[in-house]
Image (cartoon, rainbow, N blue to C red):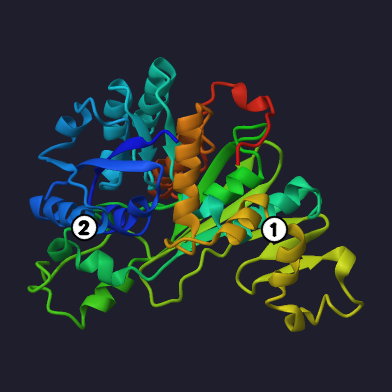
Amino acid sequence: MKKINLGIIGLGNRGYGLLYYVLLEMDEFNIVALTDTYSDRIEQAQQLCKSKKNIEPKGYESADDLLQDDNVDAVLIASSWETHIPLAIKAMQNNVAVALEVGGSSDLQTLWDLVDTYEKTKTPLMFMENCCYGRLELMTLNMVQNNVLGEIVYAHGAYAHDLRDEITFGKINRHYRLNNYIKRNSENYPTHEIGPIAKILNINNGNRFLSLSSHASKSVGLNKFLENHDKSKLELPNNIKFNQGDIVNTQILCANGELVSIKLDTTLPRYYSREFFVQGTKGLVNEENMSVFLESDIEPDDHFNWGKNFNNVDKYYEKYDHPIWKEYLNNGVRAGHDGMDYLVFKAFADALIEGREMPIDVYDAATWMAITALSEQSLATGSQVQYFPDFTRGKWIYEQDTKI
């Protein structure tokens, strides 16, 4: 089997974690080059490669230098959000295939630049949204494609994750979220929730997002959290203010009539959830209580007494598990976010080696990342409606076979 010589840009929590748990465990990749803003991270990653695989990837002082290495076939971009698109563009211009980690974009023009560069160079790019490969999400996709849920009307998702430590410790932990929460107010991390929903709704493949509007709550969660911490030790001023609302709700309208809602909830005490929810004319799937409600299966009193069926998803896995997960369970689930990380990198590697289109392509990336910029504009103008660019330039109307 042909192997991919992979370089990694960004060795913080995400980049290093992927290296440790996923990439060094996959036969499809040779790790040949590493870079980060901080030299100690490069050295730590090199030591990991030496201890786990007895390999010695080259360390580079800058991403530009790494992208000039003729030995690099593909690059994982796992650096800060603001650097994702400029680095992806440089990689494609250098004929280096791109595995682009997730995040939102604060600027629509750079997304057009990303699409234009891909169309000019045809260098493969995949947006590495691992949640598209979650077991529940893929089962729901399979159910939708087989008309089990009927015609889809509504979907909801969230990035609901208590990140108060990660954000406020940003200076001492060298994490980029802090500046975003100080300066911006937006749906800053939309793709975990919107990615699986977009695939289910055939966005850019016979359907598209038309418009959105966003509403944000006040911002008090991080300041309350900091009342119990010494701000000087965190290298933060005593009068620090955060612009990012604690809760951001965004509503999206689709060309085919579906309504989508997504929520950002990262600065208040809470449990982790993506609140994945898909509802059609025959039933629904709900992550929050891990249940499937099908009209064809219910008893007479189930509409009002559904609680007894919470956590019934296992029996539906038996019937509707996606073929990807059936094979995965037979072969053994790997580490990394309940196995999703391996699947998304396996999909990238297989498409690159076999010369196929990427299952999450540049048009998906641009459309999903645009939510951040559009939500910021909506919030800044009193929640006015904002309109999605059509990054496909009209090609979305032509339905094709799903790529996942």
In the rendered image, the residue lying farthest to the top is: 120
> Considering depth in this image, is 106 or 376 the residue closer to the camera?
106
Residue designated by label 1 = 321
> Considering depth in this image, is 127 or 252 the residue closer to the camera?
127
> Considering depth in this image, is 122 or 366 the residue closer to the camera?
122
Q: Please report the residue visible at 42 percent of the width from the left and 28 percent of the height from the top.
A: 124
330 left or right of 264?
Answer: right
5 left or right of 381?
Answer: left
Give the quadrant of residue 402: top right
Q: Residues within 10 Å of mark 1 (few under 14, many from 20)?
A: many
Question: What percent of the width, then of the height, locates residue 35?
Answer: 17, 43
Residue designated by label 2 = 48
> Considering depth in this image, is 288 or 57 the residue closer to the camera?
57
Give the quadrant of residue 40: bottom left
Q: Amino acid at mark 2?
A: Leu
35 left or right of 29?
Answer: left
Is residue 306 in sight in this rendering? Answer: yes
Is residue 362 in sight in this rendering? Answer: no
If you read the primary sequence from the N terminus, does the residue marked by circle 2 or circle 1 appear first? 2
What number is the disc on residue 279?
Answer: none
Q: Residues within 10 Å of mark 2 (few under 14, many from 20)?
A: some
Q: Amino acid at mark 1?
A: Asp
Question: What percent of the width, then of the height, locates residue 236?
Answer: 12, 67
Judge whether 396 appears above or below 215 on screen. above
